[in-house]
Image: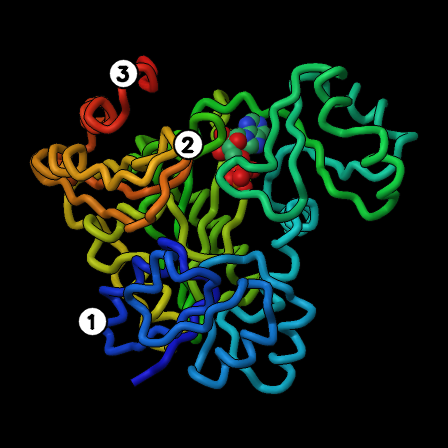
Amino acid sequence: MKRVGVIGGGQLAWMMADAAQKLGVELVVQTPSLGDPAVSIAQEIVFAAVDDASATEMLAKKCDVITFENEFVNLDALSVLEKQGVCFRPRLEALTPLLDKYHQRRYLSDLGLPVPQFFAVDRTENLKSKIEYLGFPLVLKSRRHGYDGQGTFIIKDFAALEEKLSYETITKTANQSLFLLEEFVPFERELAVIASRSVDGEIVTYPVVETQQEQQVCRRVIAPAEILPDLVAEIEAIAHTLLNSLQVVGVFGIELFLTADSKVLVNEIAPRTHNSGHFSLDACETSQFEQQLRAVCGLPLGNPGLQRAGAVMVNLLGYENSDSDYQSQRQQIAEIPQAHVHWYGKTQSRPGRKLGHVTVLLDNQSRKQAMAVAQTIESIWYPTKFLRNF
Ligand code: ADP
């Protein structure tokens, strides 16, 4: 029996529960609040913020290996533990270049992987010429702690940029830059792939999916993406290069842009399981969560293939401040043929908060049909005024 420590107790840790049971693994979770989703499934909890390294020291005493469901950790403090022999998977060195979005872009471009043009906002002198070079619109991103589009801003002109980047931010933070600026990519589609690497260096990739974001938050995922095999091969090669270079043990999510002229650019790497892989819970022989546990426990990786022709996953996002459990909407969605509803058990709903998701298995790979199913789900879930036209 293995005991796996998980830093972070959100829905990504909660969704490890079935796989843990299947593999005979116990989960010990470090998370701050009693109301966090994974509290209900953990064998033991260390109640503490994810960046509290002294809590992680306690966590380490309770388990054989530590993995991450949340990367907003204090790497410097954790590396002291790693030096003392605590086993982190992925190892901390694999996370080091990724936690800051600017460092991540640098790492990817140094590896020769395609990324949007970017630069750090660290000096006033060059800023103007760099901005003129990129042109508007451009994208401003917080270098750290961004998620679900928090910290990502599409900027239309100088006035909007100045509003976001106050004079003070630019000048007083000097070389300790907080932001990165990058070209706005007028992508044709967004794609993603989940990849996993084992202790022995074996790599498996899940089917490449299409992801659809609104206001920078993932709304739906279509598996597999309707793209040519050459493009799939190119994306798989990117995943191999990255995971091998970082010597990852565990699961990574890789988000990409596909441009109108069929160029692929890497947008972002998540050093953990990812929303774009949730379909794998119901649609694949081995879910991304089982894969994560297999990798970190040193087990052989499982088959990531789809068991059905396709699947569509729709996030159930909060659209109001409420403590409702939305029982009747969930019930109606569950009645859709081949629908699997996952409800994270959060006690508070807020606009944009991920409360659950639903995956519907499909007997064909028609994007049109996947979109129609997504529309049915969203028209049940969202009140009319929150629905956009498909
Ligand atoms: P987060 O880390 O918060 O998920 P991302 O950097 O992944 O933020 O951005 C969220 C979404 O914002 C993307 O999925 C995409 O829709 C949009 N976006 C981000 N960067 C760019 C860009 N350079 N060009 C165009 N759209 C972008």
Please give the name of the residue rendered at 42% of the width and 41% of the height, measured from the top-left corner: 192
Residue pointed to by mark 2: 351
Please give the name of the residue rendered at 38% of the width and 70% of the height, measured from the top-left corner: 295
**Which label was assigned to residue 22?**
1
Query: Which residue type does callout 2 highlight?
Result: Pro
**Horizontally, is 183 left or right of 272 in the view?**
right
**Horizontally, is 260 left or right of 37 in the view?**
right
| Marker count (numbered) | 3
Eyeballing the image, is 24 above or below 127? below
Residue pointed to by mark 3: 384
Marks 1 and 3 sit apart, C-alpha to C-alpha, by: 41 Å
Marks 2 and 1 sit apart, C-alpha to C-alpha, by: 35 Å
**Where on the image, by quarter, is ligand 1?**
top right
| First of labels 2, 3 by sequence position | 2
Please give the name of the residue rendered at 64% of the width and 46% of the height, measured from the top-left corner: 101
| Within-10-Å neighbours for mark 2: few <14, some 14–19, many 20+ | few
**Horizontally, is 8 left or right of 103 in the view?**
left
Q: Where's residue 153, x and y in %? A: 61, 28
Q: Where's residue 378, x and y in %? A: 25, 26
